Amino acid sequence: MWSDIFIGYGIFILEILTILLVVAGIVVMIFALKQKKAQSHGELTITDLSEEYEDNSKKLRDFHLTEDELKEAEKAQKKADKAEAKAAKAKRKKGEVEDKVKKPVLYVLNFKGDIHASETAALREEISAIINVANPEDEVLLRLESPGGVVHGYGLAASQLARLKQKGIKLTVAVDKVAASGGYMMACVADKIISAPFAIIGSVGVVAQVPNIHRLLKKHDVDVDVMTAGEYKRTVTVLGENTEKGKQKFQQELEQTHELFKQFVAQNRPQLDVAKIATGEHWFGQQALELNLVDEIATSDDVILQAMPNKSVIELKYKQKKSMLQKLGKQAEESADNVLLTWLKRQERTFL
């Protein structure tokens, strides 16, 4: 009797668990479909930096006022706004068109580069949006921070910036921290490069490090067969035995890539002595100015504040919608990238 009760109870529990699993599966599928749909597009956020600047300046000015002075200032502002609105209304009644002069726009973009130049996709969307609406007098400021990375990734990022020049839109690149290697490849596309005094600039060179554990595997009697079709399909490998011929071919490919890099820099900055700066070295901002790697010593904040009186300053940021799993994966990838970059640069870093 008791055994029948327990068996029946067990079957009941299994049925409940099965129903719960089915419901959970359906919920997961619906959530996944929604996430997939959300990932198909991103969102362009627009921030009026001119308005933010005015608000912050007003707060600072008002901070020093007494309570009575603050009330008087607010009263005067309301009176001025009311008079302006009244005058505009009177003009409209008379059929007069308000003669409002539209300010040129300074579009501010940000690019923080990793090894893969992952923000290139967002940069593409931002530039496409600007090209569709920009007037001839509008300009673009790119706040760039990148130590470089893969050739094809940064080559595409530089090509996206070149689209602005092809449309006759002036581009300024501001480097507050670092624009090295692939980062400088992007920067040299600009009409003007601005650097902070101690920003790292240059590193016009190509590097590749390939670990090889063939001898370790051989020591433990582990065979690795690398089979290819084509003499140079695989020049150097991590697991197989690297031949001198393969190493020479790999070095030749690096030299060819370096030559293309130098040609690109020379084409975009003809005032540079490319042979002098294409040694893989980097320089700080003031030194880079003397070498014509940059055109002016300043920060991105200086450029923005200087533009405020005569231009509308608008910041654009395209954000691709991602699932929680993608966000966690991206964070893990960035952490791994940072560890790798730290290891690669450990022997070269200059401490202050």
Image (spheres, helix red, strand yellow):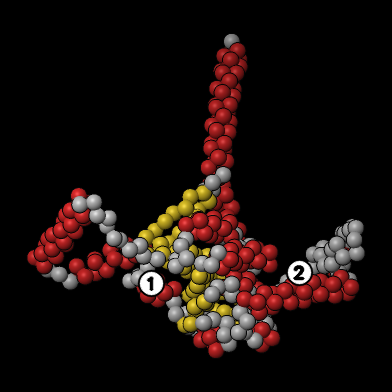
Which residue is located at x 37 percent, y 68 percent?
Answer: 311
| Relative to 228, residue 280 above or below | below
Q: Badge 2 is on which residue?
A: 210
- Asked whether residue 118 is in view, the answer is yes
Residue 217 position by quadrant: bottom right
Q: Residue at x 29, y 66 (%)?
A: 54
Please name the residue shown 62% across and 72% down the image. Answer: 185
Q: Quadrant of the N terminus?
A: top right
Question: Horizontal and vertical percent for residue 156?
Answer: 64, 63
Which callout, 1 or 2, points at the residue further toward the start of the chain?
A: 2
Depth check, mark 1 against mark 2: the one in front is 1
Q: Local crowd at mark 2 within 10 Å, few (<14), some, or many (≥20)?
A: few
Left or right: residue 165 versus residue 109 is: right
Residue at the outermost left position? 68
Q: Which mark is residue 299?
A: none
* Identity, as a three-letter code, of the amino acid under mark 2: Val
Dividing the picture into quadrants, the one containing residue 226 is: bottom right
Which residue is most to the top?
1
Q: x%, y% of residue 72?
A: 10, 64
Residue 133 vertical position relative to residue 263 in the rendered view, above or below = above
Give the amino acid at mark 1. Answer: Ala
Q: Position of residue 119 (x, y in %)?
A: 56, 60
Residue at the disc numbered 1: 307
Tell me the CA gap for discs 1 and 2.
Answer: 47 Å
- Is 130 located above or below residue 6 in the figure? below
x, y (%) of residue 310? 35, 70
Above or below residue 237? Residue 180 is below
Quadrant of the image occupied by residue 282 = bottom right
